[in-house]
Image (spheres, rainbow, N blue to C red):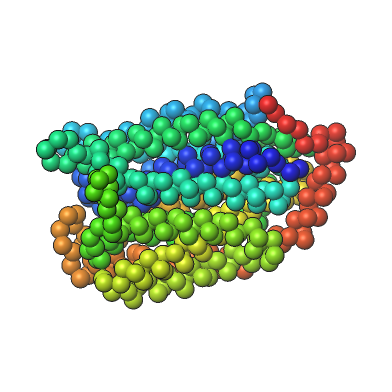
Amino acid sequence: MKLRLREKIGYGFGDAASSMFWKLFSMYLMFYYTDIFGISAAAVGTMFLITRIWDAAFDPFVGILGDRTETRWGKFRPYLLWVAVPFGIIGVLTFTTPSFGAGGKLIYAYITYSLMMMIYSLINVPYASLMGVMTADGKERTTLATFRFIFAFGGSLVVLAAAEPLAGFFSRSGNAAPDLQRGWQWAAAVFAVIAVILFWFTFAWTRERIKPVTEQTSLKHDVGDLLKNKPWFILLGAGIATIFFNSIRDGAAMYYFKYYLSTNAAFSIPALKFTMGWSSLYFVLGQTANILGVVLAKPVSDRIGKKNTFFAAMLSATVFSFMVYGLSPDSVGLVLILQCFISASAGFVFPLLWSMYADTADYSEWKTGRRATGLVFSASSMSQKFGWTLGGAFAGWLLGYYGFQANVAQSGNTQTGIRMMVSIYPAIGALVSAAFMLVYPLKESFLQNIEAELAARRAASGKPDQTTV
């Protein structure tokens, strides 16, 4: 079934909302905690590990809950309506600095960040699962995933272009010294309001249509089916490695510009009191290149297959990431060029990965006669967060290991460590992800046969694709 343009746009709005905060977390949160909030890098790394492991374990629970939710709006859409406002509120609290001592601040960070990750799961897992029940057409799913990630990177682009200028704007108050703690809190509030509105549009503009042939199933069967799903496990490994590649690069980027490149403002508009630093330009160019990769993912994968496209993209990211290590502190232009190539390569992967997760849900239904879309996507989301956990924790620990101290000149050893965190370590993650694709078994011809057989089964059972209001 061909989906209307409005529905594709509505679906894309959801990831624009999620990605604004995902990008705030991946690009700025560690820097915010160490240089503005006021806790050590090693403590942040440990906090990321502990809270994100719990959060990743929470994702399958949300998926199981979604599979068993029954409303007139469907299984997954209601969460976009119910959880949007709590998402925005906790997001602002995460970027709020309390007047506590070091120990109190650390406890506050643990509580607010843990709550934020749980709320993120409660809205993002149902959102991701929604793609699996909007259409059974594999190419339409890739189109949906393309819309999703175009809007995701668009939302991220807004954050990367506006976060630092907004924080700077809100930090100013008359002739008083800038208050960056207040600035970041109000910047987060702006993004929170936008996110809530976008989630509500996704709820209003999308529909659920796919009904499994077997309505009643047990948790034991659902988990058992997942554990026997070999293609899903391969994607699990590829997903973890891909997110590790991205998260460690993202977590180290602010430090790379502040403490290794030591660059000044890229450009400014004095009349608007607007200044963009080289780091913001780096992020904006990266997101723009990401969008280019996302747009090209469908036509390229239609021609050479999802598996081959994924493999080639991650192999390219590996090569370009290794090249970053050799750049000198005055090579800002080359840093920006390589950022574009690396980000374009990564952009190919994201829509393919989630489209391929939907394919593994079809494979499981074809093989077992049962479908647990929420569990497949929640467990997949868990893998993404686990990769993000590893990348974020390693970023904090590596900064501590290399002797990082906030807001002081860094030693040569520390600068070398920061350079490796934006080059060598991400390259290893990208290479591992490419290696997983070599053994991924679901090729396009096989998937077409699965799609046709499942359609025949649904028609024979009297439960063809349906639409909820």
The quadrant in which residue 86 appears is top left
User: Can residue 382 be spotted in the picture?
Assistant: no
101 to 29, vertically: above or below: above
Q: Residue at x 47, y 39 (%)?
A: 17
Q: In the shown orientation, is residue 172 left or right of residue 113?
A: left
Q: Nearer the viewer, residue 177 or 108?
A: 177
Q: Is residue 89 visible?
A: yes
* Number of marks: 0
Residue beneath the point at 41% across and 73% down: 322
Residue 447 % position (x, y): 75, 56
Q: Residue 446: x, y in percent?
A: 77, 59
Which quarter of the rendering shows the N terminus? top right
In the shown orientation, is residue 160 left or right of residue 311? Answer: left
Q: Residue at 51% of width from left, 26% of height from top? A: 82
Instruction: Residue 271 in the image: state x and y as whole percent.
Output: 25, 45
* Residue furthest right as drawn: 460
| Front one among 401 and 295 | 295
Judge left or right: residue 437 versus residue 451: left
Residue sitting farthest toward the front: 271
Relative to residue 134, is residue 178 drawn left or right? left
Q: Quadrant of residue 340?
A: bottom left
- Residue at point 53% right, 27% down? 81
Residue in front for this viewpoint, 17 or 245: 17
Quadrant where the C terminus sits is top right
Most extreme residue toward the bottom, as rendered? 326
Rendered location of residue 335, percent (x, y): 36, 68
